[in-house]
Image: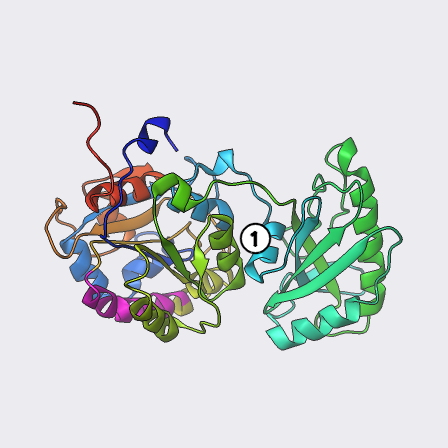
Amino acid sequence: MDKYLEDLIEQSEKRIVFLILDGLGGLPLERGGKTELESAATPNLDALAADSECGLHQPIGFGVTPGSAPGHFALFGYQPTDYPIGRGVVAAMGIGFPMKAGDVAARMNFASRDEQGNITDRRAGRIPTDECAGLCELLNQVAISGVEIFIKPVQDYRAVVIFRGEGLSDQVADTDPQKVGVKALDPKALSAAGKKTAGIVKEFISQSLEILKNEKPANALLMRGFAELPHIPSMPELFGLKPLALAVYPDYKGISRLLGMQVIENLSGLDDQLDALKSYWQNFDFFFIHHKYTDSKGEDGNFKGKVAEIEKVDAIVPKILEMKPDVLVVTGDHSTPALLKAHSSHPVPFLIHTPLVSLTRSGGAKEFGERACAGDVWGVIEGTNLIRIALGYAGKLKKYGA
């Protein structure tokens, strides 16, 4: 955070809501066509955009494709390049695992491979969480001298592995090749400090593949995001906020915990999130509502499925507005075009709305979509500025200077 901003923070009872559709940004399937967001029937978001300030934001920088953790860090005002964080810690924090200093965590995907050892599905057909939990139990047979190993299910095909022992380091390269038709990569040390841990991970993978060899479809595993527990200043410390996270998916609970948000557990969908928003409205002044499945459908290449997820979120917008937030921001953490089946570097549409008092300068956008937002008042900005704008519009920043 900019140093001068610390002196401008002031408390107020005004409330800010960030409604985040993961992987919101998209691309048309053919030249001249519409993106997923532009194709969706979003009467509520379109009406909101017409009465809001709109634009596009870059989570990290032009041409740079963000991961989920960096994308969310930017949304919450943290420069992602100042706080590099491996997905392993995010996953461990997401399930509430009590990491200790010196632990190394890694995100793990159960995957499928053929008889030649080539990866055929990086997500093992998106196996359900209960099957993932059973596989994690099987892998508890792995034993390596001098290190404790904790293997925990996260959700669907995702799990997390935590290594605990002396002299461990997160300087280990991912084994996920990020594509199919090739073998998993070796867990190579990224520096001399990582050699011991890389050897442990290699042995862990070797034993695990032997245990999984007769499993279908999850007969392989891919590891990425090796990380140790970092120190990150909290949102209450930086911005004087009382933040609450209403997220279903564990990784986003982990990001929230890392940034000092309180997290509500056992939410299973948008209805639960709305109920929690109402229940805790008087106790907090910043609310993070997260919807994962726009991203999941994009990664699956399911254009229509992503459109349907956007429409589901559009339907809850009136319920959020009933709470009369002083500032509502609607956006995503990055783009996940179904065309690409992956995150991309394309800037992300956003709108900033002030329902009670017209503090915003509408730019005339007729709908909430990439092209409409690109031509509105904000143009393209850095993602880290969104929370600063929201704080200013919520009266949580004092005047600078005389």
Residue 42 relative to residue 108: left or right = left
Q: Could you tell me the amino acid type at mark 1?
A: Val
Figure disc tally: 1
Main secondary structure of the magenta stretch = helix
Asked whether residue 201 is in view, the answer is yes
Which residue sits at x=44%, y=71%? 267
Comparing 59 with 387, the one in front is 387
Name the image quarter holding residue 262. Answer: bottom left
Coordinates of residue 224 in the picture (x, y in percent): 66, 50
Coordinates of residue 124 in the picture (x, y in percent): 65, 68
Q: Is residue 316 one of those drawn in magenta? A: yes
Coordinates of residue 151 in the picture (x, y in percent): 72, 62
Q: Quadrant where the N terminus lies?
A: top left
Q: Quadrant where the C terminus lies?
A: top left
Comparing 28 with 62, the one in front is 62
Residue 138 relative to residue 400: left or right = right
Q: Which residues are magenta?
A: 306-324
Name the image quarter holding residue 247. Answer: bottom left
Q: Is residue 110 one of those drawn in magenta? A: no
With respect to residue 323, does 58 lie above or below?
Answer: above
With respect to residue 43, does 396 lie above or below?
Answer: above
Element at label 1: helix
Coordinates of residue 118 in the picture (x, y in percent): 74, 58
Which residue sits at x=53%, y=56%? 254
Say few, some or many: other residues with alpha carbon within 10 Å of mark 1 (under 14 / 14 to 19 / 20 or more).
Answer: many
| Residue at the spot of label 1 | 90
